[in-house]
Image: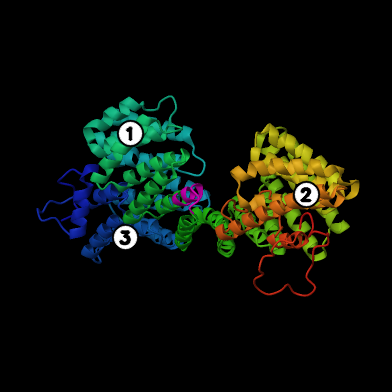
Amino acid sequence: MVESVETSVPLCRDFVPELIRVVEQGGDESGVSWNVVESLELLLDAGAFKDANALASSVVGMLGDDRRNRLFQAYIELCDLIQGAPLQLAIERIEALFIEIEHGGFSHNDRCWSGIVLARALAIGVYTHALPEAELLRARTILSLEFSRGLTESSAVTHIKVGLELARTYVHCPNPELPAARELLSRLASLCDSHGISPDITFDVFRLLHQVGGEESCPAERLRALAHPLGGVARGLAELVIARGEAKLSAGATASLEKALVLFQESSYRSGEFEALIALATSSAECEHHAKASRLFSQADVVATAGGFMYGRGIALLGLFNSAVGSGEVENARLSAEKLRLLCASEIFMTAFGLNTVAAHQLVGAGEVAVKLAMKCEKAFSSQGLHGLTAQAAFMLGASYADGGKWKQARAAWKRALTCDEVRRSYISACDRRAALAQAIAMVDFTEHGSLRDSTVLEVEGLLVKSERSLAPFGQSTEAVHALGKTLHIHAQLSILAKQPLNALKHLNRARESFGALALQREVALTDGLTGLALLEASKQSGPQLLDEAMSALRRSLDFFVGEEGSRVTWKIRYYLAVACIIKSQHATDPLQGEAHRQMAAGFLEEASADSSLLAVEGGMPRASNGEGDFSPGLQADVLEPLKKILGLPARRRKGKPSAKGAAQPHAKYGGYLH
């Protein structure tokens, strides 16, 4: 059976299936024994977290009250954490065990591994955004103190293993510090060469050295040569790390990964199997082979679930969701979004993938779910002092409210998002928050009064002018130009609301220049649509001569969004084209020409109704409202009904209760150009 004794049979990665069999059966009939810590490390390395948990639990049960069980209790807590246990409780327990082991006369080996387990738990918290980045420094301090003891207290093997753990904290972190990792790994590589370290540990050092790149990186051919005598899993790992270094998988790299995948599957090496599946699935998705990508992401989800790797499940499910969106499979997208929501019951999953899950539910039109989850994310990030993520969560919460027309709640959320960005002096992203806030302030006033009061115009003008000024020091940087364009979009929309179309056109001309310089075709098309609205509004004052120009701009926008965006935008553009056609029909001197314009308006209205109905079925699938500039925000499909009556078209059957008395009604003749 597996016992806490020195190994009598050397373990390697290809031995994982046999080790899993022993764990599942509770013992080895041949009586061979292995070192438990080495066995646990091998299972963790292979992504077999459930099996590692079972092994550690068996040893703790076998030892009973014997103090030797402390280290294995720490491993249990780590495995539970990876599978979704509460973070703070797990870290408190691991830290208590670490202190007891450190000061309780335990062996140096136990002290070393308890420090590694605690450092891993802290790194998991930081990596999943459940802990502030300062905790990563604490993890490094623990490992650095152990590493600084050097070869005087540790064996060369233990010393190098601690060094590898320390190097990973520089590589796998929110902001990788590759120079520090390279320097440390170069030292470890020299130790491997000079101390005759075992080939498998040497391979691990050079594999990570290849990953971080740089002048002293391990060449691909040398890495393959080191892996060759170590068995199939090592050869697969070599191909995996080499392929990940490519910007896009080549045909040769894809073939190598597919071979490695088979080796991983044969060896029950779930971590390698998972990474190979994700790499292949991502490559397929980038090539728009969505059916293949979905199959691979689904396999990755099964592998992560079997091993108890919750973070991996999140990556796989997000891939499944995006593939479903890319192929227009609405129900599959909703199913993946729901699975993501269920996983958000775990703290580390919510902090790691909560915002992605909010965006997923925005895309499938599940606004109430998006609101609830965005609230949880904002609260969690705020409690940890993570201002950037708090701002993003509040921003997305505001967008979810705005999607449902709840502008007051959106205004409050966007105010909090702006405050967070101003506190951390994130000037460019603050412009996005400020523009969204200006939009919400205007929409609250417009919804309540049917127009913008002068005081509201001054308030939103002040916000938007402040944004433009704050961008000036950044010059023509891509981020600044993009932020300026979005600010100008909002400024233009609010100018149209305020019945100032000439000001709107000035802002839109500048926005078109900004987006054109960045080759952002979607934003250019939005600019064309807004230009059409501004010209339509201007025609009220200047006469019908601007209508042809307005329709031309709207048609350019429609041509783009028919192919790219779908019904969320196209129904609005067609609505405004119908308005323009009706106005033209009223100014036509020839009755036949007037009737032709009316027929054209009827065609646009029918297409707009079809788009609107499709959007209701898809639940917002074409594009999430995530706080970016929208086209005519707040416009609802019921504005189509007055035009249908004018043209004698069948009206849509109304559902639900009639509007309450005193509710703001559209003031313009045809339901309002914007709302």
Q: Label for residue 597? A: 2
Badge 1: few (under 14), some or many (20 or more) residues near its Cα, within 10 Å? some
Magenta stretch bounds: 320-329
Label 1 is placed on what type of residue?
Answer: Ala
Label 3 is placed on what type of residue?
Answer: Gln
Q: Which residue position is annotated with label 3?
A: 73
Badge 2: few (under 14), some or many (20 or more) residues near its Cα, within 10 Å? many
> Which structural element holds mark 3?
helix
Q: Which residue position is annotated with label 1?
A: 255
Q: Is the magenta stretch mostly helix, strand or loop?
A: helix
Label 2 is placed on what type of residue?
Answer: His
- In this rendering, is residue 300 above or below 230? below
Q: Label for residue 546? A: none
396 lies left or right of 147: right
Report the coloring of the rendering. Answer: rainbow
Residue 75 is situated, as x and y percent measured from the top left of the image, at 32, 56
